[in-house]
Image (cartoon, rainbow, N blue to C red):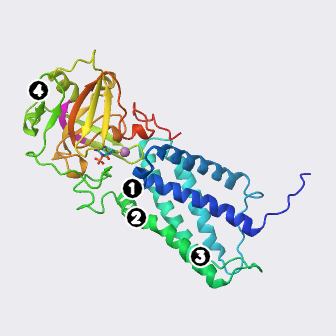
């Protein structure tokens, strides 16, 4: 017979859970909030790894050792068991949707993204309610209850701050386009317009030019590009974070055609570099990728000019690759004998971003 370990105390078990949940909430905000992502910079992939592996370890602990090592704290005093079980419910949802973020086709992953975000919000609300209403363990050595209550309020305030900042993002993700005006600036349904700067660059046909570092011609106006032979394609758009929009009609010009017309010499400079008018975002494609994926320079989606938030007046669109390849507000194209990693690629995402290439770890 297996000798029985002495049972862990309520407070020990309670704090084990509190530390884990705190780790997920903190690292989760780091991944979800663009301001935090920017602040993390090169630490982004490390935080992501911690979040993911932590989740796996915690999920296994919940499943495998739940009876012994990791029992959910039994209700004590006035804590309501039904309320406590909600935390477990959210944690299970988070684990399941977390796994689903890495597997399956884009539609399961877009559902998983929404479920993960919504259950994370549920868990945070649970934590806040817990901190503010939870009757502390009946410890004989308990600190005076006013001090204890003050501590709970402080913790709750600290935990709420990022949640409040994240809420608009979350609602946008859940609704697709709740804030039609202002925040998403006319984005098409289902798209979550991203920007790594504050707001979206505003161009007009007068203020916008495409600069090409080529021997043939250096700048292009929008109407010049729109007079080139157009290409139209119906394709699926997929962000690496899981959301996807299927069957988008895009209109523009064929990138390879355009590059050939400006005298690109892929034998000498096989890498094509793309620069955004936001001044920060960059991308790159190799000659091989351009031949294989047939990217487009797009000026219209679903029959309308691009929205300001979606790259007006011109964006790159790489069919079959994750959305981060599809650089918005394209203003400059350059050529190089070597690769230069793009914005998200410097932060750990693959340069060859074909769908399925990214597994998180
Ligand atoms: N300049 C610029 N281009 C960008 C981004 C960005 O933040 N800045 N985000 C990329 C990412 S991660 C995605 S998923 C798509 C989103 O496209 P959308 O705004 O049309 O939804 O744009 C890509 N192109
Ligand atoms: Mo993305």
**Of the residues under marks 1 and 2, which one precedes in the sequence?**
1
Helix, strand or loop at disc 2? helix
**Which residue is disc 1 drawn over?**
35
Magenta-drawn segment: 249-254
Q: Position of residue 360 (x, y in %)?
A: 50, 41
Helix, strand or loop at disc 1? helix
Alpha-carbon span between mark 1 and mark 2: 10 Å
Viewer-nearest of discs 1 and 2: 1
**Of the residues under marks 4 and 2, which one precedes in the sequence?**
2
**Which residue is disc 2 drawn over?**
165
**Of the residues under marks 4 and 3, which one precedes in the sequence?**
3
Crowd class of label 2 (few under 14; some 14 to 19; many from 20; radius 10 Å): few
Q: Is residue 289 magenta?
A: no
Q: Position of residue 11 (x, y in %)?
A: 73, 69
**Of the residues under marks 1 and 4, which one precedes in the sequence?**
1
Query: Disc 4, disc 2: CB below 8 Å?
Result: no
**Of the residues under marks 1 and 3, which one precedes in the sequence?**
1
**Which residue is disc 3 drawn over?**
151
Viewer-nearest of discs 2 and 3: 3
Q: Position of residue 185 (x, y in %)?
A: 23, 57
Q: Is residue 252 magenta?
A: yes
**Up-down: is 312 above or below 124?**
above
Crowd class of label 4 (few under 14; some 14 to 19; many from 20; radius 10 Å): few
Alpha-carbon span between mark 1 and mark 3: 28 Å
Alpha-carbon span between mark 2 and mark 3: 22 Å
Q: Is residue 188 visible?
A: yes
The mark found on residue 217 in the picture is 4
- Viewer-side residue, 163 vs 292: 163
């Amino acid at each position: 017979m297996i000798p029985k370990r002495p049972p862990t105390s309520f407070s020990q078990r309670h704090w084990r859970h509190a530390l884990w949940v705190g780790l997920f909430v903190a690292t989760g905000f780091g991944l979800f909030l663009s301001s935090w992502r920017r602040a993390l910079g090169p630490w982004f992939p490390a935080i992501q790894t911690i979040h993911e592996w932590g989740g796996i370890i915690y999920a296994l602990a919940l499943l495998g050792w739940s009876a012994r090592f990791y029992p959910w704290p039994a209700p004590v005093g006035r804590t309501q068991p039904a309320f406590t079980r909600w935390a477990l419910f959210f944690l299970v949802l988070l684990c399941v949707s977390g796994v689903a973020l890495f597997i399956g086709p884009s539609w399961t992953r877009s559902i998983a993204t929404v479920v993960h975000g919504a259950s994370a919000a549920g868990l945070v609300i649970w934590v806040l309610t817990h901190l503010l209403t939870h009757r502390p363990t009946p410890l004989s050595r308990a600190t005076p209850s006013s001090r204890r209550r003050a501590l709970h309020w402080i913790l709750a305030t600290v935990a709420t701050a990022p949640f409040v900042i994240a809420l608009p993002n979350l609602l946008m993700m859940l609704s697709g386009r709740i804030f039609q005006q202002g925040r998403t600036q006319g984005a098409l349904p289902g798209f979550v317009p991203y920007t790594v700067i504050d707001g979206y660059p505003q161009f007009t046909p007068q203020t916008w030019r495409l600069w090409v570092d080529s021997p043939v011609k250096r700048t292009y106006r929008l109407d010049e590009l729109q007079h080139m032979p157009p290409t139209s394609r119906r394709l699926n758009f997929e962000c690496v974070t899981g959301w996807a929009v299927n069957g988008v009609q895009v209109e523009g010009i064929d990138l390879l055609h355009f590059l050939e017309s400006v005298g690109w010499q892929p034998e000498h400079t096989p890498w094509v570099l793309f620069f955004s008018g936001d001044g920060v975002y960059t991308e790159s494609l190799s000659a091989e990728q351009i031949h294989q994926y047939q990217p487009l320079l797009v000026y219209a989606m679903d029959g309308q000019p691009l929205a300001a938030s979606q790259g007006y007046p011109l964006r790159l669109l790489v069919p079959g690759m994750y959305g981060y390849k599809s650089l918005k507000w394209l203003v400059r194209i350059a050529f190089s004998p070597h690769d230069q990693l793009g914005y998200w690629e410097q932060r750990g995402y693959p340069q060859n971003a074909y769908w399925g290439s990214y597994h998180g770890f």
